[in-house]
Amino acid sequence: MKKTIILLVGLFILSFFANGFAQEIKIGAGAAPTENILKPIREHFEKATGIKLHIIASGPKVAMENLQKGSIHAAAVGLSFDDLLALMKREGSEVKDPASLQHTTIGRDRIVVLLHKDNPVSKLSKEQLKGIFTGKITNWKDVGGKDMPIIVVWGRLIPATNSLFVRHMLDGESVTKDILEATTAEDVKHNVASNIEAIGIGPIAVVDATVKAPEIPEISRPIILVTIGKPTPDVQKLIDYIKGEGQKYIRQ
């Protein structure tokens, strides 16, 4: 009888921990929340709560579409809520019922320009950036660099970053069609790090020893977490962790 009780208690404990670690939050996310917040806190959040954090780095449009389909618990984007709604409309995926959505600010991000670490250029003005990214300036010697062609790297999976940069730096003008296409912010960084002639953009969290970020006019934005209705208890735990203990791990 005693052995049976011990066995049952053991099974209960195993079941408790198994169920605890079987919990999972699925977050669709753009580049800024992924690199600045979710990746840096993931391991620590999982250890602290026993909840697995599954990050789907899909960009804001797909994240919002998945949220409305119910396939993820929340969407994290590097835009204000109004800018997010405007982006979705421009992308042909307008949010049908904005009133059903709740959002909370979980951080801030600064968009940076990425250059190869051996590129001598250390500062770029708005006029120079506009010329480069619209294709009017095509050689680094025209902005104080070496005599070599400029390769514009453009990430197709970071539309929130792109749209904010275009609005603030290009005054809404189209980016040159002569680009080296990349996907995520990490992929943009990899392509810049691999080509001394390259230039790209991304959230500040992607900057490391493989690239450099020259001085540019500041572009900052909020990072928000969006849910349909009130956040689930697990998503609320994530929000509370990000705003509390997680602050020591966040890059911004």
Image (cartoon, helix red, strand yellow):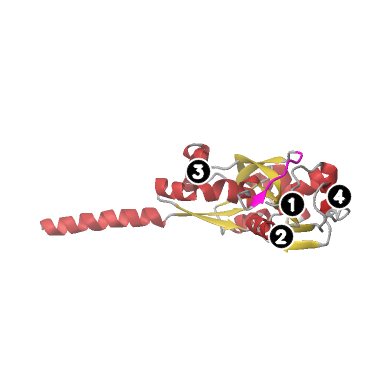
Q: Which mark is residue 162?
A: 1
Q: Main secondary structure of the magenta part?
A: loop
The reply to whether the C-beta atoms of the residues labelled 2 and 3 are less than 8 Å apart is no
Q: Which mark is residue 236?
A: 3
Residue 187 painted magenta? no
Q: Secondary structure at mark 2?
A: loop
Q: Earlier in the sequence, mark 2 or mark 1?
A: 1
In this rendering, which labeled residue sits more in front, label 2 or label 3? 2
Within 10 angstroms of label 2, few (less than 14), some, or many (20 or more) residues?
some
Q: Quadrant of residue 63?
A: bottom right
In what quadrant of the picture does the N terminus appear? bottom left
Q: Which amino acid, mark 3?
A: Gln
Q: Residue furthest right?
A: 136
Q: Earlier in the sequence, mark 1 or mark 3?
A: 1
- The one nearer the camera, 59 or 118, is 118
Q: Earlier in the sequence, mark 2 or mark 3?
A: 2
Distance of label 2 from label 1 (alpha carbons):
20 Å
Query: Which residue is at a point 87% across and 53% down the rendered structure image?
Result: 137
Task: From the image, tell me which residue sits under label 2.
Answer: 195
In this rendering, which labeled residue sits more in front, label 1 or label 4? 4
Q: Which residues are magenta?
A: 211-217
Q: Which amino acid, mark 1?
A: Asn
Q: Which mark is residue 101?
A: none
Q: Which amino acid, mark 4?
A: Asp
Give x and y (percent) for residue 45. Answer: 45, 47
Within 10 angstroms of label 1, few (less than 14), some, or many (20 or more) residues?
some
Query: Which residue is at a point 70% across and 52% down the rendered structure image?
Result: 118
Give x and y (percent) for residue 85. Answer: 72, 48
